Amino acid sequence: MKTLLQAIGTAAIATILLACQTIPETNPGLDINITDLQFEKTTPFETTARVTLRLTNESPDPIAVRGAVHQLTLNRIEFGKIVSGDRLEIAPFSQSTQDVTMHISHLRVITRLKSLADTVTYNYQLKSRVHLDSPRRRVRLEKSETLDLSPPKISTSL
Protein backbone atom coordinates (compact mmCIF):
# COMPACT_ATOMS: atom_id res chain seq x y z
CA MET A 1 0.00 0.00 0.00
CA LYS A 2 2.84 2.38 0.90
CA THR A 3 4.55 1.71 -2.47
CA LEU A 4 1.33 2.44 -4.32
CA LEU A 5 0.92 5.78 -2.50
CA GLN A 6 4.56 6.70 -3.26
CA ALA A 7 4.04 5.89 -6.96
CA ILE A 8 0.86 8.00 -7.09
CA GLY A 9 2.61 10.87 -5.27
CA THR A 10 5.59 10.75 -7.64
CA ALA A 11 3.30 10.72 -10.68
CA ALA A 12 1.31 13.68 -9.31
CA ILE A 13 4.46 15.74 -8.68
CA ALA A 14 5.83 14.93 -12.15
CA THR A 15 2.53 15.95 -13.74
CA ILE A 16 2.49 19.27 -11.88
CA LEU A 17 6.11 20.04 -12.81
CA LEU A 18 5.54 19.24 -16.48
CA ALA A 19 2.36 21.33 -16.59
CA CYS A 20 4.21 24.38 -15.21
CA GLN A 21 6.98 24.33 -17.80
CA THR A 22 7.11 26.67 -20.75
CA ILE A 23 6.95 24.35 -23.73
CA PRO A 24 8.69 25.38 -26.97
CA GLU A 25 6.35 25.52 -29.94
CA THR A 26 6.44 26.50 -33.56
CA ASN A 27 7.05 30.10 -34.53
CA PRO A 28 3.74 32.03 -34.74
CA GLY A 29 5.12 34.30 -37.50
CA LEU A 30 7.77 36.28 -35.61
CA ASP A 31 10.95 37.55 -37.30
CA ILE A 32 13.86 39.53 -35.85
CA ASN A 33 16.57 41.85 -37.25
CA ILE A 34 19.29 44.08 -35.86
CA THR A 35 18.72 47.64 -37.08
CA ASP A 36 21.31 49.59 -35.09
CA LEU A 37 24.25 49.19 -32.73
CA GLN A 38 25.62 52.13 -30.73
CA PHE A 39 28.56 51.87 -28.34
CA GLU A 40 27.82 53.83 -25.17
CA LYS A 41 30.26 53.21 -22.34
CA THR A 42 33.67 51.55 -22.10
CA THR A 43 35.48 50.34 -19.00
CA PRO A 44 38.75 48.37 -18.84
CA PHE A 45 36.82 45.10 -18.81
CA GLU A 46 33.75 45.64 -20.96
CA THR A 47 31.93 47.86 -23.41
CA THR A 48 28.23 48.60 -23.16
CA ALA A 49 26.31 48.82 -26.42
CA ARG A 50 22.73 49.74 -27.22
CA VAL A 51 21.27 47.36 -29.80
CA THR A 52 18.05 48.17 -31.61
CA LEU A 53 16.08 45.09 -32.65
CA ARG A 54 13.14 45.06 -35.05
CA LEU A 55 10.54 42.39 -34.37
CA THR A 56 8.11 41.68 -37.20
CA ASN A 57 4.75 39.98 -36.73
CA GLU A 58 3.87 38.21 -39.98
CA SER A 59 0.64 36.72 -38.63
CA PRO A 60 -2.98 37.95 -38.42
CA ASP A 61 -2.92 37.71 -34.60
CA PRO A 62 -1.21 40.07 -32.14
CA ILE A 63 1.92 38.75 -30.45
CA ALA A 64 2.73 39.64 -26.83
CA VAL A 65 6.42 39.28 -25.95
CA ARG A 66 7.21 39.12 -22.24
CA GLY A 67 11.00 38.82 -22.48
CA ALA A 68 13.86 37.50 -24.56
CA VAL A 69 17.46 36.30 -24.52
CA HIS A 70 19.63 37.06 -27.56
CA GLN A 71 23.16 35.91 -28.39
CA LEU A 72 25.17 37.93 -30.93
CA THR A 73 28.06 36.38 -32.85
CA LEU A 74 30.30 38.16 -35.37
CA ASN A 75 32.57 35.99 -37.56
CA ARG A 76 32.16 33.13 -35.08
CA ILE A 77 33.17 35.31 -32.12
CA GLU A 78 30.53 35.43 -29.42
CA PHE A 79 30.20 39.09 -28.46
CA GLY A 80 27.70 38.72 -25.68
CA LYS A 81 24.22 37.96 -24.51
CA ILE A 82 21.36 40.38 -24.36
CA VAL A 83 18.67 39.77 -21.75
CA SER A 84 15.47 41.79 -21.78
CA GLY A 85 12.41 41.48 -19.59
CA ASP A 86 10.58 44.29 -21.38
CA ARG A 87 7.04 43.54 -22.49
CA LEU A 88 6.25 44.29 -26.11
CA GLU A 89 2.94 44.02 -27.98
CA ILE A 90 3.23 43.60 -31.76
CA ALA A 91 0.05 44.21 -33.71
CA PRO A 92 -0.91 41.87 -36.59
CA PHE A 93 1.17 42.35 -39.75
CA SER A 94 3.32 45.06 -38.21
CA GLN A 95 6.73 45.75 -36.73
CA SER A 96 8.04 47.11 -33.47
CA THR A 97 11.53 48.13 -32.40
CA GLN A 98 13.13 47.54 -29.04
CA ASP A 99 16.34 49.03 -27.60
CA VAL A 100 18.27 46.54 -25.47
CA THR A 101 21.64 46.68 -23.71
CA MET A 102 24.51 44.32 -24.48
CA HIS A 103 27.70 44.01 -22.43
CA ILE A 104 30.74 42.98 -24.48
CA SER A 105 33.56 41.37 -22.50
CA HIS A 106 36.96 42.63 -23.64
CA LEU A 107 38.70 39.50 -22.36
CA ARG A 108 36.52 37.28 -24.55
CA VAL A 109 37.01 39.34 -27.71
CA ILE A 110 40.55 40.74 -27.43
CA THR A 111 42.36 37.62 -28.68
CA ARG A 112 40.37 37.67 -31.92
CA LEU A 113 40.34 41.38 -32.77
CA LYS A 114 43.14 40.99 -35.32
CA SER A 115 41.13 38.47 -37.32
CA LEU A 116 38.18 40.90 -37.38
CA ALA A 117 40.41 43.80 -38.48
CA ASP A 118 41.98 41.75 -41.29
CA THR A 119 38.71 40.73 -42.93
CA VAL A 120 36.42 42.55 -45.34
CA THR A 121 33.52 40.12 -44.98
CA TYR A 122 31.52 40.10 -41.77
CA ASN A 123 29.02 37.41 -40.88
CA TYR A 124 26.73 38.04 -37.96
CA GLN A 125 24.38 35.63 -36.34
CA LEU A 126 21.65 36.46 -33.85
CA LYS A 127 20.16 33.57 -31.90
CA SER A 128 17.11 34.46 -29.83
CA ARG A 129 14.77 32.80 -27.38
CA VAL A 130 11.63 34.93 -27.26
CA HIS A 131 9.12 34.27 -24.48
CA LEU A 132 5.50 34.90 -25.44
CA ASP A 133 2.61 35.70 -23.11
CA SER A 134 -0.38 34.01 -24.64
CA PRO A 135 -0.21 31.12 -24.86
CA ARG A 136 2.77 30.91 -22.53
CA ARG A 137 5.58 29.51 -24.66
CA ARG A 138 9.00 30.31 -26.07
CA VAL A 139 10.10 30.60 -29.68
CA ARG A 140 13.62 30.17 -31.01
CA LEU A 141 14.64 32.57 -33.76
CA GLU A 142 17.86 32.71 -35.78
CA LYS A 143 19.03 35.40 -38.17
CA SER A 144 22.27 35.36 -40.17
CA GLU A 145 23.49 38.10 -42.47
CA THR A 146 26.72 38.80 -44.39
CA LEU A 147 28.25 42.20 -45.05
CA ASP A 148 30.94 42.27 -47.74
CA LEU A 149 33.09 45.43 -47.70
CA SER A 150 35.50 44.36 -50.43
CA PRO A 151 35.95 46.89 -53.24
CA PRO A 152 33.84 46.29 -56.35
CA LYS A 153 35.55 44.48 -59.20
CA ILE A 154 35.90 46.62 -62.31
CA SER A 155 36.21 44.90 -65.64
CA THR A 156 38.88 46.30 -67.95
CA SER A 157 37.79 44.44 -71.06
CA LEU A 158 35.31 45.89 -73.50
Image: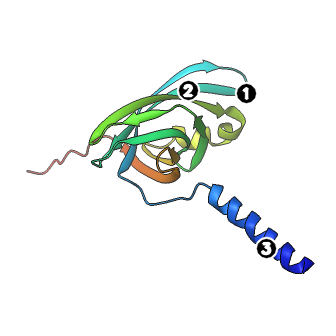
Local packing at callout 2 (Cα closer than 10 Å; few below 14, some 14-19, many 20+) is some
Determine which of the numbered discs, if any, sits on residue 125 in the image: none
Disc 1 secondary structure class: loop
Disc 2 secondary structure class: strand
Residue at coordinates 60% horizontally, 25% vertically from top-left?
48
Of circles 1 and 2, the one toward us is: 2
Q: How many marks?
A: 3
Q: Nearer the viewer, residue 1 or 13?
A: 1
Q: Nearer the viewer, residue 121 or 151?
A: 121
Percent of width and height locating residue 9: 81, 68
Determine which of the numbered discs, if any, sits on residue 45 in the image: 1
Q: Amino acid at mark 2?
A: Ala
Residue at coordinates 52% horizontally, 52% vertically from top-left?
137
Q: Is residue 102 above or below residue 63?
A: above
Determine which of the numbered discs, if any, sits on residue 49 in the image: 2
Q: Is residue 18 above or below residue 65?
A: below
Q: Which residue is mark 3?
A: 8
Percent of width and height locating residue 99: 47, 27
